[in-house]
Amino acid sequence: MKFSANELKELQNRGVSIEKVEQQLDNFHKGFPYLPIAKAAVVGNGILRLESEQADELSLKWDATLSNKGLTIEKFVPASGAATRMFKDYFEYADNDKMSEAVEKALENITKFAFYDQLVELGVDVNTPKATIDAIIRDGLNYGSKPKALIKFHKYSTGSRTACEEHLVEGALYGVSNDGKVKIHFTVSPEHKAGFEEVIASNLSKYESRYGVVYDITYSEQKSSTDTIAVDMNNEPFKTSDGKLLFRPAGHGALIENLNDIYADVVFVKTVDNVVTDQRKSDTVLYKKALASLALNLQSRIFSYLRAADQGSIDIKEACEFIELNLGYRFANGVCTLEELLSVLNRPIRVCGMVRNEGEPGGGPFWVKEPNGAMSVQIAESSQIAPEQKSLMSDATHFNPVDIICLPKDYKGKKFDLTTFVDYSTGFISQKSFAGSELKAQELPGLWNGAMANWNTLFVEVPITTFAPVKVLTDLLRIDHQ
């Protein structure tokens, strides 16, 4: 496609190459293929199950490793999304008097929410439904326009905590480097950054004193260079009323760029809304440590094979068997050349917790066919699975809670360029609107889906007690949050 001089300047200002935009336009025309699913990953075939004694031993090993090694550790929390969907029913009630079961439940249990005391302090008449809901979503708490991270999730005798504060506490329980520092990185939206800084600044010294640590909190925003071009329903570039090209944020997959800027040895990745109260954190802490220890064990073995290859002494058959047993990868015909072996070994590592499927929404673990005839384990969303293969979803015993340990450095201590391990054929196309006009938008491969498709991956079963997401307001009434 030929771009005007003004459009070329716009692309340059965004840091987007013409080639990238042309590829995106081509994706709209051709569409994205479904993932070639082979079968669901299950315990014993793609998912590792730890006995309780093994989890305990690995957790203790993690503690010992932190004491003896100068590892840099960072907790990476995608937290830029607003809580719009969380309060959808409440806006409909406030604006259109549409009462729903969710709104009724919230009103009946208003005293159980961690933000109840704030409503009282604001002078809200909590016996008046409209006033109460309006104070929650608009004037008052203004939760309807805040990110989940800044919502009061849990009530304690010492005061209530926001979701982002719970991540500070978690970091102090499993992510302390041997220098006593806890590094946590939040991805935020520009309009919410000040809110994060205010909450963190007013609470940091309290948690540092309580846990005897020093926090290093950093933030980043989704890069405008990762935004994707929008098209009209004829797949032509969408133009705004002033004739400019329209670009849209490309989903959480764009955050691979932010993760790529983290230079820690070990990175814990977890969604912002999956936190529990202190009395229920034991399983979360135990398995975070166990998974991190497992990841380091794998890394040690991988590095030993790569160093042996450098010295010309690698046992190809043994290394091939190690990969097939431990790294979620099956070579075509069960054999590999030295070149294939080294290509697979020299990749970033991720260990992903998987919980038993109890009806919660989320992607699942599957074996996927590779173009070269091999198979690898991947996290697949339902939209990535062809209609004729939907029956395979019923075979999936587990789903993805986003509980990931990342090791982003190679055997020479150099950080991988994570953007080179993305499977760009796994994007998404969705229908949206702008100023009343229909359009098509394109999302990049999801952060834990196609963005990490070419990592070395181990799936590990973790207890359902480690997973307590807050998707709607009444989820905060679950036992995990009370």
Image (cartoon, rainbow, N blue to C red):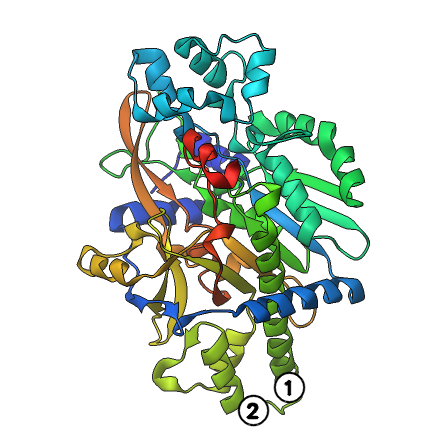
Q: Is residue 300 above or below residue 335?
A: above
* Helix, strand or loop for disc 1: helix
Q: Is residue 238 visible?
A: yes
| Residue type beneath disc 1 | Ala
Return the x and y of residue 209 as percentages of the image width and height.
80, 39
Using the image as rendered, state which of residue 336 and residue 211 is in the foreground. Answer: 211
Report the number of discs: 2
Return the x and y of residue 57 as percentages of the image width and height.
64, 70
Q: Is residue 249 above or below residue 29?
A: above
Residue 248: quadrant of the picture? top left
Q: Which residue is mark 2?
A: 315
* Helix, strand or loop for disc 2: loop
User: Would residue 317 be found to the left or right of residue 205 on screen?
Assistant: left
| Residue type beneath disc 2 | Asp
Q: Which residue is mark 1?
A: 308
Question: What's the CA distance linking mark 2 and mark 1?
Answer: 8 Å
Return the x and y of residue 348 as percentages of the image width and height.
56, 65
Res 210 label: none
Q: Quadrant of the N terminus?
A: top left
Using the image as rendered, state which of residue 186 and residue 415 is in the foreground. Answer: 186
| Residue drawn at x 28%, y 64% as measured from the top left | 36
Q: Earlier in the sequence, mark 2 or mark 1?
A: 1
Return the x and y of residue 54 as percentages of the image width and height.
58, 71
| Residue drawn at x 69%, y 68% as measured from the top left | 61
